[in-house]
Amino acid sequence: MHNFSHIRHIFFDLDNTLWDFSANSHRILYEMYQAFDLQEMGIHAFDSFHDQYRMRNSHLWSEYKLGNKTREEVRLERFQHTLYDHGIDNRLMAMRLADYYIENTRRVKDLVPGAVELLEELSAKYPLHIITNGFEEVQDFKLVNTGLRKYFRSITTAESAGQLKPGKKIFEHAMRQAGAEASESLYIGDSPDADGHGSMNAGMSFIWFNYKKEQNTHRFNCAVTELKAIGAML
């Protein structure tokens, strides 16, 4: 049994921990595929478009984390490269897709199952906080739009902290903002590297939300596959 009696502050990741990023992104990409008639442009299968976008987006985010790409470059190039992968060299169309994605993804409200119930339970006992790598204006809108903003005392983004997870600085910035010590802070997130290793390196306790049910090769002391399991631990 895990002992979290020392915890006074709880910090959450947002995307794929509370807000169902994978499902919401898939939904908007499918709407985009239809709205812009991409099949007629030569992208004959949505799955091909979706898979190439995910690959390009992942690579560009890695470059963004290294400081090799700006936010604006990531937003545009993930679509520009995806189109190019399908034989379409059209920067204007890529810009339209980029704008559509940002504007529409943030309005989708699907949450990870059990998110609201867990936040209701924990917010009655602890100050809750967010630490996210997502773009600031998008994440703020998501929290308000889904009704989650009311649960959190502070929101720390990579932009406000000047560093992306798993960097130590963003976690330290969040704890200072929250008035919390690392020894009394718990972080909950889905990414083994950005969330797990990052928070633990900053001295925080960590619960891995392993919704993909991956093998725990990271040897985290505490892992759950459903959010509802967390409430009983705290």
Image (cartoon, rainbow, N blue to C red):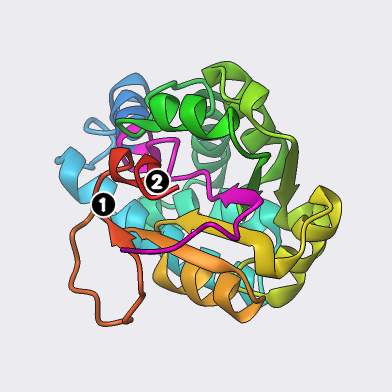
**Amino acid at pointer 1:** Tyr
Q: Main secondary structure of the magenta part?
A: loop
Q: Is residue 234 visible?
A: yes
Rendering quarter of residue 124: top right
Camera-nearest residue between 228 and 159: 228
Question: Who's the residue at 30% across and 35% down the image?
Answer: 23
- Viewed as shown, does residue 71 lie left or right of 208? right
Marks 2/1: CA–CA distance? 9 Å
Q: Is residue 85 visible?
A: no
Dot label at residue 211: 1
Residue 159, image x, y percentages:
77, 54
Residue 218, image x, y percentages:
33, 81
Camera-nearest residue between 57 and 145: 145
Rendering quarter of residue 224: bottom left
Crowd tier of the residue under label 2, counting other residues whose Cα lies within 10 Å: few below 14, some 14–19, many 20 or above: some
Q: Is residue 13 magenta?
A: yes
Q: Which residues are magenta?
A: 1-25
- Viewed as shown, does residue 75 lie left or right of 44? right
**Amino acid at pointer 2:** Asn
Secondary element under disc 2, as helix, strand or loop, is loop
CB atoms at circles 2 and 1 under 8 Å apart?
Answer: yes
Camera-nearest residue between 153 and 93: 153
Rendering quarter of residue 210: bottom left
